[in-house]
Image (spheres, grey):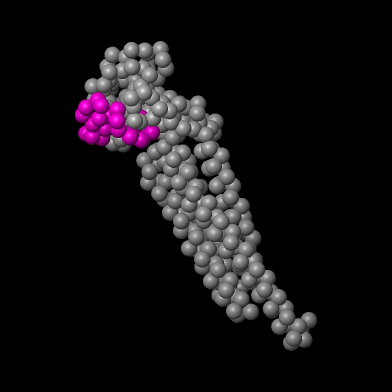
Amino acid sequence: MALSNNVIGGINFIAVLLSIPIIGAGIWLATEPDNSCVKILQWPVIILGILILVVALAGFIGGFWRIPWLLIFYLVAMLVAIILLTCLVVFIYMVTIRGHGHLEPSRSYLEYHLDDYSGWLRRRVRSSYKWDRIRSCLGSTNMCPELNQNYRMAQDFFNAHINPLQSGCCKPPTQCGYTFVNPTYWISPINTAADMDCLQWSNEQTQLCYNCDSCKAGLLANLKREWMRANIILLITLVALVCVYLIGCCAFRNAKTEDLFKKYKQGYV
């Protein structure tokens, strides 16, 4: 029984270590400017990681100190945590499966359209109340001013691989036909009827295209990219956690069988 308990404790120590990538993924999301403005995914990931950490610690203590009720709690609670993590991984995949950038002639950067993204994500930015808060947060970052520092000439800017947020929020849509002055100052649109965003564009540096659907789409494109990266970490951790849990279940069953056999030999059964 002692050997089996040590094995269970060791296995649960691995589960403790597996909670670290989950918590780390949540913290990484929280440090990204766009995620810190939206505040959707990072806290569920961090909370779930902490939950797995606490449950794994309970199993670790229960294994080494031979506390049966704590091991039973671990088995039930970890199963619940694994189910929750599985649901989170599937959810992230489902809401990020749609959406992509569009190429424009003579441009290296991509353009983004709001309708390309999942309905759940679109609802996170369509509400004026929610968007006003997100817009204010994005406006406080340095993402647009840094374009003026990096690109002086029009062709240099057109050949740049700027991120989706900068493409959607810091410049007007390419199809509007605005003339480049600098990355955040454009004049003389050719076709303002091409897109409603053409009318939303403002050379006022606090406004730019923050009220445009292209800015919302650029935000969702950025979120999608970061969430997919985080989801890869969560998926790998989930697979490892399931393996650890199944091994732990087998070790717990063997320990109970060993204990029952020992009692049988001693005449208790």
Q: Is residue 149 above or below residue 64?
A: above
* Residue 12 percent location from the top left of the image: 55, 67
Residue sitting at x 36%, y 17%: 176
Q: Is residue 17 above or below residue 96?
A: below
What residue span does the magenta drawing correspond to? 146-167
Q: Is residue 226 above or below residue 178?
A: below
* Residue 48 percent location from the top left of the image: 52, 52
In the rendered image, which quarter contains the C terminus?
bottom right
Tell me if residue 78 can be seen: yes
Q: How many marks?
A: 0
Tell me if residue 46 can be seen: no
- Classify residue 6 by image quadrant: bottom right
Q: Which residue is farthest bottom?
A: 266
Residue sitting at x 40%, y 27%: 103
Residue sitting at x 27%, y 18%: 179
In the rendered image, which quarter contains the N terminus?
bottom right
* Residue 43 percent location from the top left of the image: 47, 47
Q: Is residue 149 magenta?
A: yes
Q: Which residue is farthest front?
A: 106
Horizontal side of residue 58 vs 256, given as left or right: left
Horizontal side of residue 67 vs 144, given as left or right: right
